[in-house]
C-alpha cells in the first residue's frame, strides 16, 4: 500500500473546496431534568466538503483538547439511512436543505460568517437525554402496537404465490422509505407524529399481505400514537422537513383507514 | 466446539445435498411446552440478531435482546443497498441451489466450509418467502411477481431488491417481527445497552455483563445460551463504510473468554465507494455494487490526465475491467474490481481533485435507456452521490474508489453456529462461517437472515434439549460479581488515565496503520511493520488517552475508548493472521503470492484451512488452531473471471 499518497484519504490531505468561518450556538443540557442553555463556539477554517456532523466532531476534538466535556449528539451510519441523527439547525429539523439528513448536510450549503444555532429535536414525546440527544422510543411503541404483519418464521408459502400489483408495491415502498428519525415530529407545531405513523401504516395497509390485520392495526397504531403525540392540524411542516420526502397523502390515507377501522372493528366485534 | 483440543466442526455425514435435511431430523427437539423454561440472551438487533430473537421467541423460548442503539431498527444492516440473493430461479436462467452454493464457494476463493454454504443456499429460498410475507416491499414486475437483478460474481439474475434500500426493508421486516414479540411480552428488549463481557461458569457461557449507556449502570444478565449477533470489525480501519458505532467489542470480549477468533485477515474492500475528500472525513460512503450492472468503469489512458472526463475521447480511455475480463467485465467479484482500481490509481491514472478515484460512467446507459429509466433504477444512489460530492452524476461520471466494507473473519463457529465456548453462539457478520476469503454481493443479507430465521432456531434446540431442567446460573453466583467488578474497573481505568489525546485521535492513527499494512495488499515486511507500530501506538493509548466526563451518564468518549482498546488487540491479530497465511486468497492479497497476471495465488496444499486463534493472556500471542477444509463438491481451481 502506497501510504504516502493516502490513496483512500487516510493521510493528511487538503480539501479541494473552500473554507468557512462559522459561529455555532449549541444547546447543552446535562440530563432530562437539568436546565439547558446555549454555548457559543467559534469554528474557523471549516472545509466546505465536510458534513455537519464532522463539524461537530471537530468542535468536540477541540473541547477534549481543552479538557472540556464533548457535546453528545446522536449519529451512526452517516449516510442518511439509519435515522439516528437529528438536530434542529437554525430552527429547521435536519437543517434547511430539503430531503437531507443532518449527516448528509454538507458545509458547502452554508456561507462564510454564518451564525448557526443547533438544538435537539423539541417535543414532549422526545425528552432530552443529554445535550443534543433525545429519546425517540415512543416511535417503537407505535410499531409494537401493530406495525407488523403477524407471520411466524417458516409459516409461509412461496413468495410468488401472492402477486403484489407493481403500483401497490411501489407506493408501499414510498411509505416504507421512512427512516424513523422524528424530523416530522420536531418540525410540527403540535409535535404530532402523523407522518411517521401513516408511513409505517401505509407500508403494510397498501399491500395484500397486510390486509388480514389492516383494521386492527390501524386503530391500534393511531390510538397509541395519540397517547404520546399532539394532534395533526394539517400544517404540512412534517413533509417539508422529512429527509425522505414522505408524502402528506399517507396521512390522508391513514385518516380514511382510521374512520373505516372504527366502523369495521365495531362490526367485527359484533357491536353494531 | 473443541474436542480433545481439536476443532470439531460438527458437520454431519452424508451427501452434501442432504446434510441439512437429514441433520434437521436427527437433531434433538425441545418440546413446545418446555421451550419457555429456557432463557436466551441475544446481543445485537441487525438482520441476524433481530431475526433470531423474533424466531426463537415465536418458538416459545424466553428471549432477552440487547442493542446499544436507541431502537433495534438502527442497526447497520439498514444501510445495505443492493439486494439479497436467493436461488429461486424465477428468471428461468439456470439458477439452482447447487449453483448458488457453487458460486459462493468459488467467490469465497475456496476458503469456506462447504456444508455451511450449501445450507445457506438451501435456506435462501425460505428467506425470500418469509420476507415477502412480512410485507417487505420488494421490487415487482408488472404482473405483480418478484423482480430480480444480477450482481457481481454471478452469471444469473438471482438478486431480490427493494430499490436501493434492501437492507433497510429487510431490517424493518425483522424489526417488526421482533416488535410483535416484544408487544406479546415474550421478548425483553434492552436498548442503549452495550455488552462488555461474556460470563462463563465451568467453561460454559452463562450470561453477559452490560453497561447502560444512559445511566452508566453495569449489570449482569443470566441465560442458558448467549447469541452474539454483533456485526463485523471493519471500523478497525477507522475509515470504512461501517456506521460509526460498529465495533468488535462483544465478539472480542467473548474471544478473551475462550471463543476462538477465525480468519481475522479476511477483510473485504468494496469497489464502489465515494473517494475521501479531506482528512476530516469520518466515514466513507458506499454506492451499491448494483451500479456496476450498467455503469462502465474507466480511467484515462494517460497518467495525470487533468482534463474533464467529457473531453477525453473514447480512444484515450481505458475500460480496464472490460479489457482484462471480457466475460465478466465490470461484474467481476469485489476483490478483483478493488485491486484493479488500486492498480490504475497507483499508476497515476486516478481521477478527481485528489487523483484517488476511477470513473463509473452512466452516459452510455442514459443515452440508451433515457434519464427516467436510470433515475427509476438508481435515482436514490445518484442523489446521495450528488449530496456528498456536489457533482451531478447524470452529467459527470461518478468517481469511485474501494473502501473497507465487510469482514469475513470473525468468531469461529461450528455447523450449529456455536463458538468454542459451549452455550455461546455467533451469527451474521460476527461469525466467520460462510463467505470464505471473500463475500459475494447480496450475500451478507442472505447469511444474516439465514442464520437468524432458519439455522440457529433449529441448532440451538439440539444443544438445549440436553439441558432440560437445568436452572440458569443465578445472578448471586460469584462469577457474575467477579465479572461486574472487572468491567467496572476497566471502565474506570479509561477515565483515570488523564492524558492529552482523544479516543478519535488514536482511532485515526490506528486506522492509518491498518489500512497501509493490512489493507488491500499485504506484504511480509509491511505486516512486520504493523506488528511493531500497533503495540507502540497502543502503549501510547494507555498512557496518553483523555476521556473527559464520568462513567455515570451518557459518555460517548468512554464508549469509544473501550471499542478502540479492543481494535488495538484485534489489529495485532489481523497482522499475525495475515503474516502466517503465506498465500493470497479473496480479500487477503499477499503481494508475494500472485500469478504472473497479478491475480491472487492460493496455496491449497498448505492453506486450505481455517485459522482459528485461541486467546491466552494480555501480552501473550494467541495460539493458531487449524480446521482443515475438505472440498467434496467443488473442485479447487484458480478463480477466473476472464
Image (spheres, coloured by chain):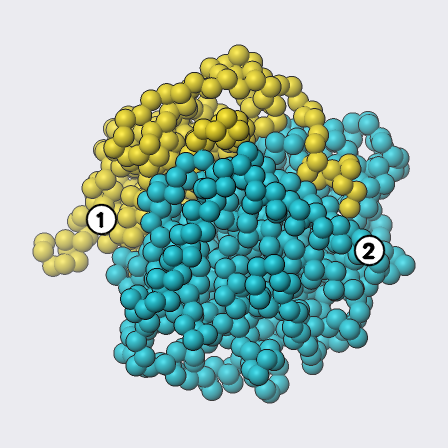
Q: How many marks?
A: 2
The chain drawn in cyan is B
Palette colour of chain A: yellow
Q: Is residue B337 left or right of residue B18?
A: right
Q: Nearer the viewer, residue A130 or B288?
A: A130
Residue where numbered disc 2 is placed: B591
Residue at 18% from the left image edge and 53% from the top image edge: A265
Q: Quadrant of residue B225?
A: bottom left
Relative to A93, does residue B578 appear above or below in the rendering?
Answer: below
Residue at 61% from the left image edge and 80% from the top image edge: B6
Q: Position of residue B65 (x, y in %)?
A: 37, 59
SS assignment at label 1: helix
Q: Position of residue B573 (x, y in %)?
A: 65, 59
The disc at residue A219 is 1
Q: Quadrant of residue A71?
A: top left
Any part of residue B93 in sight: no
| Residue at the extreme left | A271
SS assignment at label 2: loop
Q: Is residue A6 left or right of residue B505?
A: right
Category of crowding for the residue at label 2, using alpha-carbon neighbours closer than 10 angstroms: few (below 14), some (14–19), many (at least 20): many
Residue at 38% from the left image edge and 57% from the top image edge: B485
Amino acid at each position: 500500500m502506497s501510504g504516502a499518497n493516502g490513496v483512500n484519504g487516510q493521510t493528511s490531505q487538503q480539501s479541494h473546496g473552500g473554507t468557512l468561518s462559522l459561529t455555532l450556538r449549541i444547546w447543552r443540557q446535562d440530563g432530562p431534568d437539568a436546565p439547558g442553555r446555549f454555548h457559543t463556539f467559534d469554528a474557523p477554517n471549516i472545509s466546505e466538503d465536510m458534513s455537519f456532523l464532522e463539524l461537530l466532531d471537530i468542535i468536540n476534538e477541540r473541547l477534549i483538547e481543552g479538557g472540556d466535556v464533548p457535546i453528545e449528539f446522536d449519529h451512526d451510519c452517516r449516510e442518511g439511512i439509519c435515522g439516528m441523527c437529528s438536530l434542529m439547525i437554525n430552527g429547521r429539523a435536519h437543517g434547511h436543505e430539503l430531503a437531507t439528513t443532518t449527516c448528509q448536510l454538507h458545509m458547502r450549503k452554508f456561507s462564510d460568517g454564518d451564525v448557526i444555532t443547533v438544538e435537539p429535536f423539541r417535543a414532549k414525546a422526545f425528552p432530552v437525554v443529554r445535550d443534543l440527544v433525545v429519546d425517540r422510543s415512543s416511535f417503537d411503541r407505535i410499531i409494537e402496537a401493530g406495525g407488523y404483519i403477524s407471520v411466524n418464521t417458516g409459516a409461509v408459502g412461496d413468495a410468488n404465490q401472492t402477486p403484489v400489483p407493481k403500483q401497490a408495491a411501489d407506493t408501499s415502498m414510498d411509505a416504507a422509505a421512512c427512516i424513523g428519525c422524528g424530523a416530522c415530529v420536531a418540525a410540527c407545531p403540535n409535535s404530532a407524529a402523523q407522518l411517521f405513523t401513516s408511513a409505517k401504516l401505509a407500508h403494510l395497509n397498501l399491500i395484500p399481505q397486510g390486509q388480514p390485520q389492516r383494521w386492527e392495526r390501524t386503530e391500534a397504531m393511531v390510538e397509541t400514537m395519540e397517547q404520546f403525540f399532539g394532534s395533526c392540524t394539517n400544517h404540512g411542516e412534517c413533509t417539508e422537513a422529512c429527509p425522505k420526502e414522505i408524502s402528506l397523502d399517507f396521512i390522508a390515507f391513514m385518516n380514511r383507514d382510521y374512520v373505516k377501522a372504527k366502523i369495521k372493528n365495531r362490526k367485527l366485534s359484533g357491536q353494531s | 466446539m473443541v474436542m480433545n483440543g481439536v476443532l470439531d466442526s460438527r458437520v454431519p455425514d452424508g451427501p452434501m445435498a442432504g446434510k441439512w435435511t437429514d441433520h434437521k431430523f436427527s437433531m434433538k427437539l425441545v418440546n413446545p411446552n418446555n421451550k419457555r423454561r429456557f432463557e436466551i440472551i441475544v446481543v445485537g438487533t441487525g438482520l441476524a440478531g433481530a431475526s433470531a430473537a423474533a424466531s426463537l421467541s415465536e418458538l416459545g423460548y424466553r428471549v432477552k435482546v440487547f442493542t446499544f442503539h436507541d431502537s433495534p431498527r438502527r442497526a447497520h444492516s439498514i444501510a445495505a443497498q443492493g439486494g439479497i440473493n436467493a436461488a429461486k430461479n424465477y428468471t428461468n436462467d439456470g439458477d439452482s441451489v447447487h449453483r448458488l452454493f457453487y458460486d459462493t464457494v468459488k467467490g469465497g476463493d475456496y476458503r469456506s466450509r462447504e456444508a455451511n454454504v450449501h445450507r445457506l443456499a438451501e435456506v435462501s429460498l425460505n428467506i425470500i418467502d418469509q420476507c415477502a410475507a412480512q410485507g417487505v416491499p420488494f421490487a415487482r414486475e408488472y404482473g405483480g411477481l418478484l423482480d430480480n437483478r444480477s450482481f457481481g460474481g454471478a452469471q444469473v439474475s438471482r438478486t431480490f431488491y427493494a430499490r436501493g434500500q434492501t437492507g433497510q426493508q429487510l431490517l424493518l421486516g425483522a424489526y417488526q417481527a421482533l416488535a410483535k414479540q416484544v408487544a406479546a411480552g415474550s421478548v425483553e428488549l434492552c436498548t442503549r445497552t452495550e455488552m462488555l463481557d461474556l460470563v462463563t461458569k465451568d467453561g460454559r457461557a452463562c450470561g453477559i455483563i452490560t453497561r447502560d449507556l444512559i445511566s452508566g449502570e453495569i449489570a449482569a444478565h443470566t441465560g442458558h445460551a448467549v447469541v452474539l449477533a454483533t456485526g463485523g470489525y471493519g471500523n478497525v480501519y477507522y475509515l470504512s463504510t461501517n456506521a460509526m458505532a460498529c465495533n468488535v467489542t462483544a465478539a472480542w470480549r467473548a474471544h478473551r473468554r475462550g471463543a476462538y477468533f477465525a480468519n481475522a485477515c479476511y477483510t473485504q474492500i468494496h469497489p464502489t465507494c465515494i473517494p475521501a475528500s479531506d482528512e476530516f472525513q469520518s466515514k466513507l460512503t458506499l454506492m451499491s455494487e448494483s451500479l456496476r450492472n450498467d455503469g462502465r468503469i474507466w480511467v484515462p489512458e494517460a497518467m495525470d490526465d487533468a482534463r474533464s472526463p467529457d473531453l477525453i475521447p473514447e480512444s484515450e480511455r481505458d475500460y480496464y475491467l472490460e479489457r482484462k475480463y471480457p466475460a465478466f467485465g465490470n461484474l467481476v467479484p469485489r476483490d478483483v474490481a478493488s485491486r484493479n482500481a488500486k492498480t490504475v490509481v497507483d499508476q497515476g491514472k486516478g481521477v478527481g481533485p485528489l487523483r484517488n478515484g476511477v470513473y463509473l460512467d452512466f452516459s452510455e446507459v442514459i443515452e440508451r435507456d433515457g434519464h427516467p429509466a436510470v433515475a427509476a433504477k438508481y435515482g436514490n444512489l445518484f442523489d446521495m452521490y450528488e449530496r456528498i460530492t456536489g457533482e451531478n452524476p447524470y452529467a459527470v461520471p461518478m468517481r469511485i474508489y474501494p473502501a473497507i466494507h465487510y469482514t469475513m473473519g470473525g468468531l469461529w463457529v461450528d455447523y450449529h453456529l456455536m463458538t468454542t465456548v459451549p452455550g455461546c453462539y455467533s451469527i451474521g457478520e460476527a461469525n466467520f462461517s460462510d463467505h470464505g476469503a471473500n463475500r459475494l454481493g447480496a450475500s451478507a443479507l442472505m447469511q444474516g437472515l439465514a442464520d437468524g430465521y432458519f439455522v440457529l432456531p433449529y441448532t440451538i434446540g439440539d444443544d438445549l434439549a440436553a439441558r432440560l431442567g437445568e436452572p440458569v446460573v443465578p445472578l448471586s453466583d460469584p462469577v457474575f460479581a467477579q465479572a461486574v467488578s472487572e468491567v467496572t474497573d476497566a471502565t474506570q481505568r479509561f477515565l483515570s488515565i488523564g492524558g492529552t489525546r482523544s479516543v478519535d485521535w488514536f482511532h485515526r492513527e490506528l486506522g492509518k496503520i491498518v489500512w497501509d499494512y493490512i489493507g488491500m495488499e499485504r506484504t511480509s515486511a509491511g505486516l512486520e511493520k504493523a506488528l511493531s507500530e500497533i503495540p507502540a501506538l497502543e502503549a501510547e493509548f494507555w498512557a496518553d488517552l483523555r476521556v473527559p466526563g464520568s462513567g455515570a451518564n451518557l459518555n460517548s468518549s468512554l464508549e469509544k475508548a473501550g471499542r478502540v482498546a479492543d481494535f488495538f488487540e484485534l489489529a495485532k491479530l489481523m497482522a499475525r493472521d495475515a503474516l502466517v497465511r503465506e498465500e493470497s486468497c479473496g480479500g487477503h492479497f499477499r503481494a508475494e503470492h500472485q500469478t504472473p497476471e497479478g491475480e491472487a495465488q492460493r496455496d491449497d496444499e498448505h492453506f486450505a484451512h481455517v485459522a482459528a486463534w485461541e486467546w491466552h493472556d494480555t501480552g501473550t500471542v494467541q495460539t493458531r488452531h487449524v480446521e482443515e477444509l475438505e472440498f467434496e463438491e467443488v473442485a479447487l481451481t484458480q478463480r477466473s473471471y476472464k
